[in-house]
Image: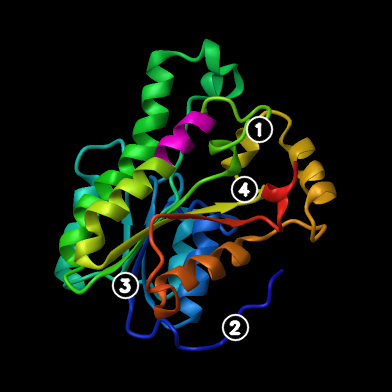
C-alpha cells in the first residue's frame, strides 16, 4: 500500500466525498488522504444496507456530516448540500465517485443495451455529477475543486467495459464543459482516471480478473495502483500547486494508458 504523507496542505478545507461503499472504495482512499492532509470530511452512504460498511469509516475520519445519498432518489442530493450549508456554510472540495449500470446491460454488448439501462447508467454515472456541480457551486464563493472518477475505457475500447465506455466519455466531456462554465468562479473541475482496481463496482465487469492481470503485465511500473495513489492525485488537484489546471482527465495507472 502507498505510504501516505503527513502534512497540512488541506488544513481548513471542507471536502464532500460521494460514493464510499466500503474500505476498498476509491472514494474512501480519497477521503482518507484528504483527512490526513487536514481537511474536514463529509461522507455519504447509499442506503441502510451500505451504512454498516461506511459508518466506521466516517468515525475514523471524524466526519461531522454523514448522510444517505442515493442520486436516483429525489431529494437526497439536495439534502446533503442543505446540511453542508447549515453545518459548514461553504465547501472547498466535492468528489463524485458514483457509477452504476444494470448488470444485464453492463455485461452485454453495447449494441444490445436497452434504452432503459443506458438511461440509468447515464443518469447515475454522469448527470449526477452535473447535479452535484450545480449544488456545490453556490457553496464555493471563493472557488473550489470538483472531481469525478473516470476510466481509460472512455477513450479507448477496453473489452468487456461495454456500456460504461460511452457513459464515461460523456462524463469526461461534462468535466470539460463544467470547467469552462465555472472557471470564472474560480471553480476547477477534473476527472481522475485510475487504472484497474479491485473495488466492488469493478467486480461487476465481465472477466475483470483477466483485466487486472493484463494491467500488471503491461503497465511500465509493473504493478497496480491502489486507492491511496488515487487519493494523493485527487488531493494534489485541490491544492494551490494545481491552481492553473482545470478540465483535465488525469491518469493514475502506472503508465498503462500510454501503451499500445
Distance from Cα at disc 1 to Cα at disc 4 = 18 Å
Distance from Cα at disc 3 to Cα at disc 2 = 23 Å
Residue 158 numbered mark, or none = 1
Q: Residue at x 39, y 79 (%)?
A: 240
N-terminal of the pair, mark 3 or mark 2, is: 2
Distance from Cα at disc 1 to Cα at disc 2 = 33 Å
Callout 4: helix, strand or loop?
loop
- Quarter of image, res 145: bottom left
Mark 2 closeness class: few <14, some 14–19, many ≥20 residues within 10 Å: few
> Magenta stretch?
164-171
Residue 5 numbered mark, or none = 2
Residue 16, relative to residue 51: is it above or below?
below
Percent x, y for residue 117? 43, 20
Instruction: Describe residue 149's horizontal placement relative to residue 12 as left or right.
Output: right
Out of 100 and 186, give the one closest to the viewer: 186
N-terminal of the pair, mark 1 or mark 4, is: 1
Callout 1: helix, strand or loop?
loop
Q: Is residue 70 visible?
A: no
Q: Residue at x 20, y 63 (%)?
A: 184
Is 29 a magenta residue? no
Amino acid at each position: 500500500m502507498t505510504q501516505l504523507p503527513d502534512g497540512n496542505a488541506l488544513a481548513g478545507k471542507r471536502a464532500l466525498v460521494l460514493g464510499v461503499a466500503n474500505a476498498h472504495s476509491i472514494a474512501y482512499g480519497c477521503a482518507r488522504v484528504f483527512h490526513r492532509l487536514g481537511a474536514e470530511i463529509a461522507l455519504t452512504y447509499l442506503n441502510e444496507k451500505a451504512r454498516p460498511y461506511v459508518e466506521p469509516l466516517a468515525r475514523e475520519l471524524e466526519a461531522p456530516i454523514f448522510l444517505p445519498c442515493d442520486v436516483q432518489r429525489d431529494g437526497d442530493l439536495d439534502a446533503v448540500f442543505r446540511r453542508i450549508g447549515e453545518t459548514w456554510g461553504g465547501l472547498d472540495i466535492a468528489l463524485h465517485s458514483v457509477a452504476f449500470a444494470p448488470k444485464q446491460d453492463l455485461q452485454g454488448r453495447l449494441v444490445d443495451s436497452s434504452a432503459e439501462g443506458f438511461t440509468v447508467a447515464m443518469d447515475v454515472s454522469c448527470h449526477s455529477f452535473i447535479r452535484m456541480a450545480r449544488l456545490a457551486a453556490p457553496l464555493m464563493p471563493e472557488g473550489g475543486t470538483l472531481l469525478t472518477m473516470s476510466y481509460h475505457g472512455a477513450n479507448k475500447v477496453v473489452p468487456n467495459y461495454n456500456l460504461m465506455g460511452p457513459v464515461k466519455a460523456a462524463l469526461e466531456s461534462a468535466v470539460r464543459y463544467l470547467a469552462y462554465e465555472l472557471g470564472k468562479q474560480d471553480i476547477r473541475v477534473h476527472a481522475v482516471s485510475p487504472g484497474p482496481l479491485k473495488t466492488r463496482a469493478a467486480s461487476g465487469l465481465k472477466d475483470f480478473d483477466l483485466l487486472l492481470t493484463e494491467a500488471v503485465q503491461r503497465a511500465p511500473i509493473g504493478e497496480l495502483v491502489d486507492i491511496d495513489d488515487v487519493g494523493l492525485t485527487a488531493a494534489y488537484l485541490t491544492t494551490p500547486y494545481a491552481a492553473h489546471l482545470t478540465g483535465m482527465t488525469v491518469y493514475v495507472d502506472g503508465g498503462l494508458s500510454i501503451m499500445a
